[in-house]
Amino acid sequence: MSRIQPPGRPFDDPELCASRAELARALRTFLPAEAVLAREEEVRPYECDGLSVYRQTPLLVVLPRDVAEVRQVMRLCHQRRVPVVARGAGTGLSGGALPCGEGIVLSLARLDRILALEPEALLARVQPGVRNLAISEAAAAHGLYYAPDPSSQIACTIGGNVAENSGGVHCLKYGLTVHNVLAIKLVSAAGELIELGGEALDGPGYDLLALYIGSEGMLGITVEVTVRLLPRPPLARALLAAFDDVGRAGAAVGEIIAAGILPAGLEMMDGPAIRAAEDFIGAGYPVEAAAILLCELDGTEAEVAAQVEAVETLLARAGATEVRVSRDETERARFWQGRKSAFPAVGRISPDYYCMDGTIPRRALPEVLRRTAELAAEHDLAVANVFHAGDGNLHPLILFDANRPGELERTEALGARLLELCVEVGGTITGEHGVGVEKLGQMCVQFSARELAQFHAVKSAFDPAGLLNPGKGVPTPRRCSEYRQLPSPAHPHRH
């Protein structure tokens, strides 16, 4: 049995059935009947997000069409003390949208309009159900784009990006969601409409916008987002460097940054990930390599030419066995297509995989990659590494088969050790996937009891009744106590 997700009550529990029928009747007094999903076959598709090993059937699923309906839903749930889990496209990878068996899933998929696109002001106002990539597609005619580009950008929504503070392969130079959002409208747990931030460079008072972004749906329901748009660079070139040693590839990352070069993207893949992506996409990757680095440089033609020359020299000096420079836009896109397809590519070679997400100082890359291999061997599991090397955001993919007794538990244990290793070397347990239900134990490792109490105080200020995405993000003191007593290798607790 999983040590992360406790068992829930069955869907046909008599008490739940009665609550479901009563709540559905109340919701349908102001929502169309088809906007309230109550049958098991209707709500089953919402039982998990992209971390599909953890599942829970919700009491109901509600699909409002506008902000007024969102507010009405929240008022009703607040009055009745019904938990609410907001959901976008369900591409999250930490169980952040895992339903509560006694609460509703509030799907924001129908709030999917681009409300305004203002090229002169370099911004767009969008509803939370707008896909990440759709913003750039709409802005392309003006020579603009939205910079954060998660691997799931073709499907993930801006509301989910706000919840998790998503990044992407170009976040090294252009920042995470928090650096590219100007304003947010949210609905509180009690149904109030609140505005954070604005179009000005700065505003008075506390920076609640930065506090809210990355709060994983625990502080409010996002109903509108104003994003910053950027001009497309005149030129971009991608370099692909092959290495016969993973440690040397990791060391090369630090050499590039230390030279004062800030790439638009700097990504790394190890041998298993390279071969999986090449078999899936045919990006032209060197399948015999132990690791590859993808480095993108953008700017004016003169800037890019000078930086390409400098990076080629650095890579050769760092031990690269081969360095290629994209000849045109088609080849540059192909280099990145392999990287962005790495997760589904790995899914073709293993019945299941568990995608971790931790961040470390760049200087620790060689050590952490070496210790990752050692820990994988100790747990008798394979790991494919794909990650944002430039900012130290690791994504080890643990390959396993959930149908084999004990493999999920071993996978959870390995994942926990990898995240705790990140803390041990001076990093953190997440970079862009959030905590969700997956990393509650490791929150107990990274933060002291006093720090966790402050997190709970912030949550209570926004949501005193604890109805928004309960059981996520911040562990209770009891959970931390239980985690530290688990029969597992010694945790490197700082506190």
Image: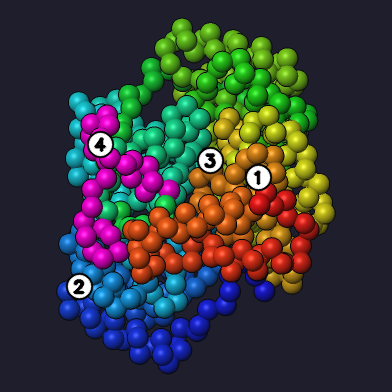
Residue bearing mark 1? 423
- Residue 31 is labelled as 2
> Is disc 1 placed on a helix, strand or loop?
helix
- Amino acid type at mark 4: Pro
Residue bearing mark 4? 204
Q: Is residue 374 above or below residue 283?
A: below
Residue bearing mark 3? 340
> Is disc 4 placed on a helix, strand or loop?
loop
Seen at 65% across and 24% down, the residue is 254
Q: Which callout, 4 or 1, points to the residue nearer the camera?
A: 4
Q: Earlier in the sequence, mark 2 or mark 1?
A: 2
> Is disc 2 placed on a helix, strand or loop?
loop
Query: Between marks 2 and 3, how big is the CA–CA gap?
Result: 39 Å
The answer to whether marks 3 and 1 mark residues whose Cβ atoms lie closer than 8 Å is no
Residue nearest the viewer, comparing 121 with 210: 210
Q: Is residue 200 magenta?
A: yes
Magenta segment: 187-214
Q: Which callout, 2 or 3, points to the residue nearer the camera?
A: 2
Quarter holding residue 386: top right
Query: Between marks 3 and 1, how big is the CA–CA gap?
Result: 27 Å
